[in-house]
Amino acid sequence: MHLRRKRIRTATAFALPLVMFVSFFATAALAIMIERQSAARLAAARQIAGYQQHHMQAGLKQLQTAWSSLFKINDEKRQARGTIGYDIIVEGAFSGGRVEVRLKDAQGSLRRRTIDLDPFVCQVLDAAADAIAGGKDFDPNTLRDRGPGQVSLESASPEVLMALAGAVDPAASAAAFAEAVLKMRADKRLTASDLRSLTQTTGLGDDKLRLLEQCVVVEPTLWMMVATTRSVGGDPADRQGGLVVGAIRGSGVGSTPGTPGAPAAPTAPVGAASATSAGSANNWTILTWGPLSDAEIAKFEQLSTIKRR
């Protein structure tokens, strides 16, 4: 009798770890299944979001092609240096809503490295970028990694303008050049014919003036685009955006080959970082795209304030 009880205790003691062992693996298997289901849902959500963004980009590129071919910049409306763009009234399932497409000049900053222009121009642009990056009060917004290498005089900050003049020649009157650009663009829309009078404020000789003029443009081809989808009531349902490259036909960009201030043709393709088709209004390129955070929207709203600084 005593031996039987001992055997029962031994069997019970052996069964408890076995049950715990099985329960552990069952719990682990359940956790793995739940984790895989969650990963599958996230993957499906990412795939759907990617599909939506792809089709939205394709649609916007077609709209940009049509709009940029027909749109003509109004000098009087341009004085405010605000956004430009258009609204699309949506029919069908989203009837009554609209998509607002807005663009702002994003070419006022320096590309960190430029390799798709004339070697001497690239050297000046890279030297200016290095000077900006090594400055005491470095502003990250003055540098970028993508888009055309040339800088837009319409949106460049005083720091960028002075860095460009100084990169051409340290003896240049960089501050006078920056002041002249800011003063003139506050009064009128800059044109290619204004370039020489602006660059002459540096006090440089003709050769260096021409070099400086090849580093800048008066009509941008790099834009920050924001597409906002609004409901019938006007509330934003979705907001996406990014950097796009394209020329507005009505602005006259690249209409005369060799004109100072027109985008120079790159000597070689440089992948996504280059803008080999920047001078064509019929070929808009989306460099970056995705949902926008509040910080990115705030940066977009501040782009025009740099011009009036």
Image (spheres, grey):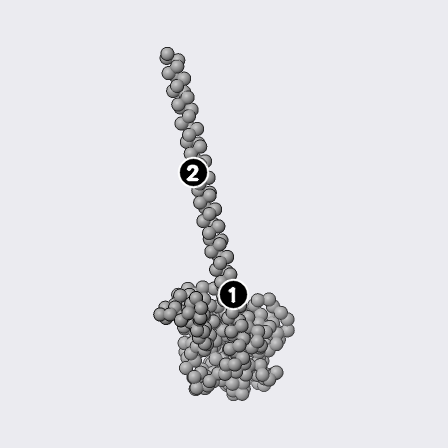
Figure quadrant of residue 294: bottom left
Q: Position of residue 44 (x, y in %)?
A: 49, 54
| Residue 233 vs residue 212, the one in the foreground | 233
Give the secondary structure at mark 1.
Answer: helix
Circle nearer the viewer, 2 or 1: 1
| Mark 2 vs 1: CB contact within 8 A | no
Q: Where is residue 195 in the image (x, y as percent from the top left)?
A: 53, 85
Q: Is residue 14 above or below residue 247?
A: above
Local packing at callout 1 (Cα closer than 10 Å; few below 14, some 14-19, many 20+) is few
Q: In which quarter of the image is the C terminus?
A: bottom left
| Residue 189 vs residue 73, the one in the foreground | 73
Q: Name the residue under label 2.
A: 27
Is residue 124 something that shows in the picture? Answer: no
Residue at image position (50%, 66%) is 56
Residue at image position (41%, 20%) is 10
Is residue 23 something that shows in the picture? Answer: yes
Q: Where is residue 273 in the image (x, y as percent from the top left)?
A: 56, 68
Residue 55 image label: 1
Residue at image position (51%, 65%) is 55
Give the secondary structure at mark 2.
Answer: helix
Residue occupying the far left of the picture: 233
The amino acid type, in three-letter code, at marker 2 is: Thr
Local packing at callout 2 (Cα closer than 10 Å; few below 14, some 14-19, many 20+) is few
Figure quadrant of residue 78: bottom left
Residue 215 image label: none
The amino acid type, in three-letter code, at marker 1 is: His
Q: In this view, does 8 lie above or below 91?
A: above
| Residue 173 vs residue 90, the one in the foreground | 90
First of labels 2, 1 by sequence position: 2
Q: How far apart are marks 2 and 1 (CA)?
A: 42 Å
Q: Quadrant of the N terminus?
A: top left
Q: In this view, does 21 lie above or below 10?
A: below
